[in-house]
Image (cartoon, grey):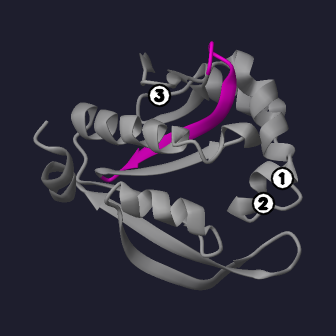
Amino acid sequence: MTTHNMRCHIRAATENDATLLADWWADGNVMEHAGFPNGLKTDFDALRERLKTQTKSNIIWMIEHPAHHPIGEMNHRIKERKAEIGIKLCVATSQNKGLGSEALTWLIHMLFKDYDIVAIVLDTMIENIRAQAVYEKLHFKQIDRLENCWQDQLGHWRTAMVYQLTYDDYQRHYGKI
């Protein structure tokens, strides 16, 4: 499945994206906002296999702009009629231009249209004010604050903000499907 937004092209990641995804996830500058200032070590073979065998309910999406140049990734996982999602714009020059909001809007519409879900849930670190502003602009509501819920790579305790967009709120703000 692929789609074109006004300024983005979104497609399911393939095994050919494994190297780029592993490189992004290993980069502390990219992963710091998620609480991994040293980046993540990724088992390349396991990631490649995961990308080869993605299921409709668990997909990594590539965000491309312009001319199909990869700038980031998002993902969704469906569990118990809820979609858990995440997004990272990994190329710094693509940030603060509204591209993440456009990509998330596409994902929101696609999930509520194509899946029998009741809500979309995501979380972010309390320090990631920019992400929180985007989520609230897209009508997500903060439903929880998880104080000191995990310790990052540097030994700092981290607090997460949990957001949710229900199907009813989606219909109220975005219209009927």
Tell me where residue 65 appears, x and y as whole percent: 61, 23
Residue position for label 2: 32
Identify the amino acid type marked 1.
Asn
What is the distance, in whole Å, between disc 3 and disc 2 at their CAs? 28 Å
Mark count: 3
Q: Most extreme residue toward the bottom, as rendered?
A: 147
Magenta region, residue range: 66-80
Identify the amino acid type marked 3.
Thr
Q: Is residue 5 visible?
A: yes
**SS at circle 3:** loop
Quarter in which the N terminus is drawn = top left
Residue position for label 3: 55
Of tags 3 and 2, the one toward the viewer is 2
Q: Would you say the residues marked 2 and 1 are in contact, meaning their CB atoms lie under 8 Å apart?
A: yes
Of tags 1 and 3, the one toward the viewer is 1
Quarter in which the C terminus is drawn = top left
